[in-house]
Image: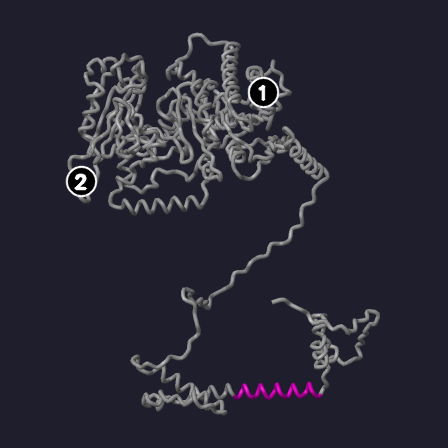
Amino acid sequence: MKFTPIVDKHVVLHDVTKKMHVSFDEPMDIIETKEKKKRSHPAHDDQDNSKVKKSKSSKKEKEDKKDKKNKKDKKEKKEKKDKKEEKSVDTKPIVTETPIVVEKKPVVVEKKPVVVEKKVAVLEKKSLVEKKPATTSEKKPAAVAISVGEPVKVRGPKFTPKKVKAKPYQAPKKLTEEEVKAKVAAIRKKKLLRKQSKVKVNGEVIVKPIFNIKTEGLSDKVIPTKQLGEFVLYALSETTNLPWCNIINKAKIEKLVFVYAQGLNANYFGTSLESVKPYVNLEELKSEEWVGKASMPFLAKHSKYMIVNEISGRNGRFNAPVADILQCNMSNSKKERLAKEQQERTQLFKNKMREYYILSLEDLKKADYPIPPFLDNSVVLPEGWKETHAPLKERKEGEQMRIIGIDCEMVLTVSGSTLARVTLIDEDGTKLLDEMVKPDEPIIDYLTKYSGITPEAMSNAQCSLRRAQKHVRKIVDHNTILVGHGLENDLKALRLAHPYCVDTSLLYDHHRGPPYKPSLRFLARNYLKRHIQDRNEAHIGHDSAEDAVATLDLFKLKLANKPNFGKFKRTELIMDRLLANRPPRESAIIESSKNTYRSFGSSHGGDYFRVDTDEELVEMTMEKIKEKDFLFTRYQTADEERLRALENDGEESAPSIVPSAAAQDSERAIRLQTMDSYIKTVYNGLPENSFIVVSGGVNNVPEYKKLYDKHQRYQEKYGSKKLGSVEIPKNEQWTEQNQKDLCKYAAEARMSSSFFIFKQ
């Protein structure tokens, strides 16, 4: 409805020149009655005038009002008194009356002027309603409406309302003159970068991303390694800004490749371990003095700064840098969702917990298992592969699935890793199958250090791979759960696909958290209190029967406890966080390792791939970056300790000729040059507006490695025993000075290097 104000055409406007003076000689009641106009619209002038006239009442009218009020109060008091008398009246004769009197309802029909009689009648009616039988069809008195579902809040006598403490007002901190200048300079620089991000191409303005490192944010202290992972999230998703860098128009960022190259020590690039700088300007370094800049010209040219970061740790120990980079805290909403899913799944498999831990089709794909056509009709197994068959007899209702432990040992042939031994252990510990398998091709390496296979043991082998498949398929059917550790490797060696698998490397967490996978030796020592895979004169390498029994016992231990048993901390990887982003970002982990066992595992938001050499790693990076947004790659070229261990085959024997410092520097320079060429190849294969982040891992401090090994030997030998210093040999004792030195060298080893390259 449209409002049309009534305006008087002949209204006399207020004259502001006339003033009204009020003196204190006037009566107080006249001053108090003067009211301010609420509205000054002409349409309401008549109403306001009437109000003013009423307010200017005489003293007589005031006294009349006062008398009326007193009479009213007396009347209310009398009514209250009458109510009390009515309550005291005996209601017995009313109860004895017949129901006919109730039906007449004389009180409702008659309108009596006397108030007291009406109240008595109402009371009589209430008493009749309360005491009448349930069979009567009489209406009950109207009650106060209470909304359904809202419980009545009753506060007890001890109820005390919470006192909210108001925060005292804090005045904003006054900036110093230097801080104001720095703030103004930062704003001007940001505006300049925004102008630079706009480029004209063929007459059209195109916006491009710009990356800038703010050295003023690095002047205070060394950044933690965890911020490298936060940078990945900052570049590829919507998160908070970092204090030491900023990206203009980061929505235009395409890809990010993280190069983890253990061995790129910070002391190769202009900083000493005694006095660590937060960052180093690589342009100011001299190539003659620093082997890092001399051997890696591409990295030094495209990355202006080397930023030092500190790996988390304390008391002479530190966390794995990969865990610092890739792990992030899980959100509360995700924790609640996972807990709810676990509760529902536990309820579903309440009486058959063995099936609770069976890997789903999605889990099998992520862990790189051979997929059986029984689970996926679109899968066609390669030539020579077999699948376990359906059971001859159906399981009875309530009967549990059978569990069998399996472990295989492999040797190296011309075509790669090949099956050499297969062992099946029943759940009661009996050995169902233990067969040596003769490869079809000549053996290049027996891998005795890992497999325990010797030429003497293989000389009597007569079983072929095809026959071994038949033996296994006779025992294992679809009523059987296969239990193994890294079971995908055993099934690949057997060339066998099975739909019901349990992997102990996924049932238990690594103490470092994801993406690491625990070793069977670690799990057996910590949970079963059993030492397996020990290397001594009587026992060389692994024993497949011993490993199969250990996997079975670990699975039984899990069944005896709750699903959370063996799970350390609820963390997730940055790959999972990127997958949850909108739009989602795909990720993968690619590792270069000569060991067939995968040290990393796949995550919910990323895949895992392993190659043997760094050259293959570069090729796979170029292939996967086309379909993935984030790649975490691990190289082994610059890792001196790892290469030395592979060359010595794990034997701690002193070299016959001690190499000179010049020879060591020469080998190091060659490794760094090779690593620089890999980074250059990856850079050239990346699209524009992409990042390469390089991390050097743990700093190489030989003194720390010696002391740490000594401490580990002391803990294994004397840690649980309360022995005096006299009873322990002097060379094996662990002193306070050893602990101080360990902490000192650990602090040096925790200093890592990082480089940021942005391709525009």
Position above or below: 339 against 209: below
Name the residue beneath numbered marker 2: 395
Whether the residues at callouts 2 and 1 have beta carbons within 8 Å, the answer is no
Position above or below: 13 against 737: below
Q: Amino acid at mark 2?
A: Arg
- The residue segment tinted magenta is 60-78
Query: Percent position (x, y) of residue 698?
Result: 49, 25
Asked if residue 255 lies left or right of residue 40, the reply is left
- Which secondary structure lies at badge 2? loop
Can see residue 553? Answer: no
Query: Percent position (x, y) of residue 712?
Result: 40, 26
| Residue 257 on the magenta span | no
Which of marks 1 and 2 precedes in the sequence?
1
How far separated are the C-alphas under marks 2 and 1? 67 Å
Name the residue beneath numbered marker 1: 300
- Which secondary structure lies at badge 1? helix
* Marks 2, 1: nearer the viewer: 2
Question: Which residue corresponds to the image point at 50% horizontal and 14% vertical from the top-left?
Answer: 668
Asked if residue 33 lies left or right of residue 228, the reply is right
Query: Percent position (x, y) of residue 528?
Result: 29, 33
Question: Which residue corresponds to the image point at 32% horizontal and 44% vertical from the top-left?
Answer: 345
